[in-house]
Amino acid sequence: MEKPFAITLDPGSSLANRTGSWRTYRPEYLDRLPPCNAACPAGENIQAWLFNAESGDYEKAWRSLTVNNPLPATMGRVCYHPCEGACNRQHLDASVGINSVERFLGDEAIKRGWKFVKPEKQSGKRVLVVGAGPAGLSAAYQLALLGHAVSIYEAGPAAGGMMRFGIPKYRLPRDVLDSEIARIVDLGVELRLNTHVDDLKQAMAEGRFDACFLGVGAHIAKRAYIPAGDANRVLDAVSVLRSMEGAHEEEMKPLLGRRVVVYGGGNTAIDVARTAKRLGAEESIIVYRRTREKMPAHDFEVEEALQEGVMMKWLSTIKEAGEGELTVEKMALDENGFPQPTGEYETVAADSLVLALGQDADLSLLGKVAGLVIDQGVVQVDAAMMTGCPGVFAGGDMAGNDRTVTVAVGHGKKAARAIDAWLRGGKYEASPKPEMATFERLNTWYYSDAPKTVRPVLDIIRRQSTFEEVLGGLDETNAQFEARRCLSCGNCFECDNCYGVCPDNAVIKLGPGKRFVFNYDYCKGCGVCVAECPCGAIRMVPEEN
Amino acid sequence: MLKQTEGSHAVAEAVALCRPEVVCAYPISPQTHIVEGVGELVKSGELRNCEFINVESEFAAMSVAIGSSAAGARTYTATASQGLLFMAEAVFNASGLGLPIVMTVANRAIGAPINIWNDHTDSLAMRDSGWLQLFAETNQEALDLHIQAFRLGEELSLPVMVCMDGFILTHAYERVDMPTQAQVDAYLPPYSPRQVLDPAEPVSIGAMVGPEAFMEVRYLAHAKQRQALERMPAYAAEFKSIFGRDSGGLLHSYRADDAETIVVAMGSVLGTIKDTVDEMRAAGDKIGVMGLTLFRPFPSAQVRDALQHAKRVVVLEKSFSIGAGGILATNVRTAISALPIDTYTVGAGLGGRAITKRSLHALFRGAIQGKLEFLTFLDLNREVVDKQLAREAQKRRSGPIAENLLRDVGVVAAKIV
Amino acid sequence: MSYQPISFYQTGTFTVGNRLLAPDERSVQAQVKRYNSLNSGHRACQGCGEALGARYAIDAAMEAAHGQLIAANATGCLEVFSTPYPETSWQIPWVHSLFGNAAAVATGIAAALKVKGKHDVRVVAQGGDGGTTDIGFGCLSGMFERNDDVLYICYDNGGYMNTGIQRSSATPPAARTATTMAVGAEPGNPFGQGKFVPAIAMAHDIPYVATATVADLRDLEAKVLRAMEIRGARYIHILVPCPLGWGTASGDTIKMARLAKETGFFPVFEAEQGVVTGVLPIRKKLPVEEFLRPQKRYAHLFGKQPKVDVIAKLQALADRNIRKYGLLGEEH
């Protein structure tokens, strides 16, 4: 074609005009910290595994999840999911059901028989883990993945710790727990049951261990002095729950009687009261000195207990345990919210009283460990979970007051990474946390409304009489729906918005899974991509010159 | 084939023989019969492969033509007078984009006062638009020039205006020799656009050009248009070889070889002038004629050659640049400025005023006798003009000029006042 | 509506793309190898809504026409910023003739294609609101009434932004422009003037008329694709915020379009043969003030003493749109 001078131009020739020189601010991609991840005591990258679950790649999701937590099926049942409390979606409709998706992934892994991948190389180092509870299992798992030879010494007859001996079956079926423990053992972890460590130093020397992790849990029930007649049965919650795990279930069931009173306001109190109900108690009463709002137990558990017929007696303290009855004093909250005695008394009929007033760890094995400091029953550790004794790390209930399975898993992971660094002669430094993906960072217009999926619940008759699991799981359809409710706060989910909304075509799409890059030759720095990024994964920064 | 037909219809038939692919039309007198004729040929199926589009204005007509031409279709339209001015912006644009559209202008005066009759003010108002402008003397030439216009325009990639006098030619029934399709096909190859809107080879046509290149664009447009000065005679010669008659070219001299006085004009008035010259020649006057066919580009060198031996040149033109004088005359005068020739400008036939042989005799006689002023108006009613001038001198608000004049010449009954 | 919203996908429902969708269900703009009919390097202002709208619309038209597309462009911002010698941003055959004749030029192109038997090559004409609703309106109406096979796309930014923000017949009431200054008894553009060309287009009974904004890409693309399924005169009127003319932050361009739609200030609908066949409902109805307040052209309404009466009149206009077009339908 003969093109007239100047009037007719070759297509797309404006590429010669580098409009990037106009820019005073430049957009940059970044990953902000989603609030769910920030809130997870186990340090799970929740947004990341939901991302994989959204596309139906459940195995990838599960593998992503288990980088930080080897027990998703367990966690999907027993975790109190602070992630959901932090979820940005609650400001739109309701939090994403992270816990239910986690359980789905965990169950899916058991169903499909997914295994962990053994490390290619062994470090030649040996690590002792004391206690096969969530902290110990987590540490053992992470250490094994890092190529260390791990031995777990467990004092009890089975692994699982408080997951087995403290959490009732109706919340955590034992086959689920067994499967997840077996998968860790399959990594080559040595598990020695019924092996009580009395002297850590000696145990380490005998086993030629290079380091150790302590996760002995808190199995010793706290007592309160209550005058009691001989005829009255006063038990502690830990013993009651542990006795539910006897080898011969029928024989070992605790004898609680028709009327059971549980004293305490934590989750353990709820567990015992609900267990009592299932064991046939006509009355199962929780006595707590403060109000429902002040109860440490999670509200949903209180609610489930009430549904099952557990009764609550707020603002009450037990003064005396008599023959078939208890003397209870009414309390009143003072202006600071503390309960104060009123001098008013009443009696409550009770065949047994179960004390659920908290637990302590058995720290007797630490007597000869030099440098190790214990303060008010808690082993003191540094930021890397190491005790005052080099090479001795600790976590779980014994090393903190926030005693949940999830915290323990987090401790185990963190300690394992620190042990690994220590074994290599270095010091573990957690990577710095990116800035928070707060709700204000999101452009939520792009998300359509979608109510939270409700998990199926066992019918009330069976809940009051059997130990069948109360809360059901999601099926694949609604698990995926629930996963897709994730807003992907602070992390690109490849929605193509930046790619689409750029008036200057200055965003390059790299293809599935590869995200995008800016073409700074043409980006004018208008900021539309930042404003229209649904999840807040782009920021504007001033140009340097 | 010889036939007796109306000028407009002859042109319509000739245009149809050129196989136009898109014809757009908006009616304005005296152009209407041309597009009606083409439209009928399309609708009846005689002219196939042609889109005939009735548009809502002349501006749209030229705009549609721009689009179709840019998309590679041979495109034709016709207009006149107000219509030409209404499309003026697009007229300039078509040439700027280098689109070889052919347009008939049925020449007609420009209002106000509104006037439907013939003069050349419309075309000449567009003389700087970048279009080639051809002026037809007869219906036969009008017919022939359309065929040549497509050839010329498409060769140069420039639009061409074929100007023919409104009513005098468009509505006159005369004998014409209508060529055959085979003749036209032999002369006019299919349109092969220089640039075209084509998804296979995308280009952007119509860029914004700033001071850095605009002057060059204008220079190149000028240079391109000047190429017509060589092409036009060549195409006329080729035309003669196929069609057997002289038509087109740059200019035609008539009995001018030894003429001391040469009358210069464009269009149908040349016939009357030639008759007058014949009579004056018979009476012994050394007078001749030079008829200009190509007004744009202006064939300055050829005009100079044709006029170089004359003592005086009388430019009789149906146009007038208010406040300046003749338009054709100015171009002629520039062409012969180096020669010692007296050049007279005569405005004639404005708004359809009849140009009679008697008036021409008197005019040319006066010129030969040295009595002609350098700027005159043929048959101007001096009395009426003087009256109005006197009125205006007396009174600032002297009323509408046109109505005053009509009253003075008695067309409007005085009693209405 | 003309497209089926993907209701079961919770994230990405309204976004440009969605990795969870099958490739053929994704938007044109989400494709790695999209046409980019309007290429990088154009000289539009930062955050230009028109540049965005033009790429959205023309890329979709290219998709529908399998790359066989020719565009005629009216004079205006889009023309000036895309084709200053010696560079053009257009990757498609494109012609600019004049300010007021884009529709007629497109008619000519369509006629040429028809006569040459190139039925697969399609024609769009495009211009700003000035080139469409004012100076080009005659040619537009002519193209409509002849039902010429042209898709005309108007990028409405509510004024003559290229010449320095003067008022057009698409400038909304009370808006400040360089020719409707925010001074005097009735500051800004007078109420009771202006015209809504989509409604006039419908009055021509042409096969397809639609409005859209740059805030709803999938809706916009669906409308262009629908329009391209039809032969004859079609009209799409796209609201494209102008950061310069509206006095908004360059990053807020899409937000402003969204607010125009969510307040009912700009009705988004489509019509076939002169009858409304669908509306894009308001998802979360907002008071018109939300749309007005971020714009400097309405700053005179929000001085020390807010002009509540004027704001109420603008709200009434939005409410009228909501009633007239039924903009509060259920969200799909």
Image (tube, helix red, strand yellow):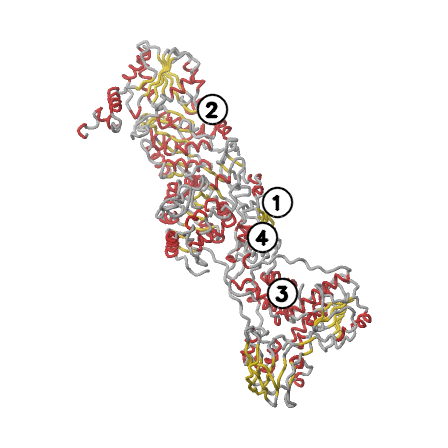
Image position of A308 (left or right of B185): right
Image position of C265 (left or right of C23): left
Secondary element type, mark 3: loop
**Is label 2 or label 4 in front?**
4
Other-residue count near label 2 (Cα within 10 Å), few / some / many at <14 / 14–19 / ≥20 = some
In three-dimensional space, the C-alpha distance between marks 2 and 4, rounded to whole angstroms, equals 60 Å
Dot 3 or dot 4, earlier in sequence: 3
Query: What is the residue that sits farthest to the left in this orientation?
Result: B415
**Is label 1 or label 2 in front?**
1
Secondary element type, mark 1: loop
Q: For the residue marked with disc 3, what is the amino acid?
A: Cys
Residue A85 horizontal/vertical position (percent): 57, 66
Q: For the residue marked with disc 4, what is the amino acid?
A: Ile
Q: Which mark is residue A40?
A: 3
On screen, residue A520 above or below A385: above
Residue B19 horizontal/vertical position (percent): 42, 34
* Quadrant position of residue B82: top left
- Provide the residue designation for mark 4: A538
The reply to whether label 1 and label 2 mark residues of one chain is no
Q: For the residue marked with disc 1, what is the amino acid?
A: Glu
Secondary element type, mark 4: strand
Q: Is residue A447 visible?
A: yes
Q: Which mark is residue A544?
A: 1
In three-dimensional space, the C-alpha distance between marks 1 and 3, rounded to whole angstroms, equals 37 Å
On screen, residue A211 above or below C75: below
Residue B170 horizontal/vertical position (percent): 32, 28
